Amino acid sequence: MKMKVLVTGASGFLGTRLQQHLAERGHEPLCVSRQRSSEGYDWSDESLEAGVEAADAVVHLAGENLFSRRWTAKQKEILISSRLETTRRLAALVAEHRPSVFVCASAVGFYGPSTRLGLDESSPPGDDFLARLCADWESAAGPAREAGVRTLSARIGVILGRGGGALQRMLPPFRLGLGGALGSGRQWVSWIHIDDAAHLLSFLLESEAAEGTFNLTAPNPVTMTELANSLGSALHRPTLFKVPAIALRLALGEVAEVLLTGQSVLPRRAQELGYRFAFTDVAEAMRDLVAS
């Protein structure tokens, strides 16, 4: 069934690719942005309600970038409000107007720093700032779930794609042959190719059996060293350099701990539903993304 899909964060890194894929699937993406255009909606009460009322499905991707600046007390307040307040507003409107499905983004940071292999959707939450934020973010969608709307939390890993995200920050030094792992390089990175991230979101929208929590990660997490080596190999550049942990902590503060730790997360529920990943090998994903 073709759907009108309201997407918040539609102009962002993942939102842009999701819009493209939805259109390719025959759906009609409806966009929510900070400034209303003739073809979309904004965050004013009247416009947002009109968007939800017009939609068959809602995908909520909007939120302040987690890694754009140091986590000062003020920045933490911005990160919290940009997720919880918008989610609560949308969840209330979804509960009222009852589209068929509501997908709310979350992050694998829900699990907290962990050396345990193979975390899945049944694994418990962590207890650092990001884990608590993710747990509250998911809980904020509760009104939609309680109203009987099929509601999903998408715990998204490190998205690899052209023109944004982690890869955009990694490419300049790696192209110069100055790339390498962060810290020890032994921390786990739960990654996903941007095409799989968009395709999996669409798959979950279309799958009536999909409800609850889903990890949006490739089935083969890698260490930071493996990630760096795969990018270096795709670019035909060495990866001899490492960014010392102390340098990251001095530069980024608390944010550095997220980069220096990590989680090994598996997309168990998506695979059980039958989703087939296009990219399961990080080296293949990197070659696809840096190909000229």
Image: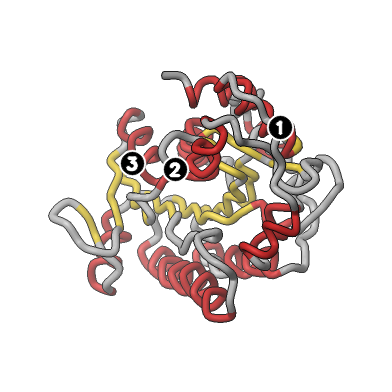
Coordinates of residue 103 in the picture (x, y in percent): 49, 52
In the rendered structure, which amino acid carries the disc numbered 3?
A: Met
Res 254 visible: yes
Please give the residue where the numbered disc 3 appears in the rendered image. Answer: 3
User: What's the amino acid at mark 1?
Assistant: Leu
Q: Which label's residue is closer to the chain start, 1 or 3?
A: 3
Query: Would residue 112 appear left or right of 60 to someone viewing this image?
Result: right
Residue labelled with disc 1: 240
- Say which of marks 1 and 3 sits in front: 1
Which of the two marks, 2 or 3, is nearer to us in this view? 2
Please state if 292 lies on the left or on the right of 173 as rendered.
Answer: left
User: Looking at the figure, which quarter contains the N terminus?
Assistant: top left
The quarter of the picture where residue 133 lies is: bottom right
Circle 2 sits on which residue?
164
23 vs 87, left or right, is left
Tell me the CA gap for discs 2 and 3: 27 Å
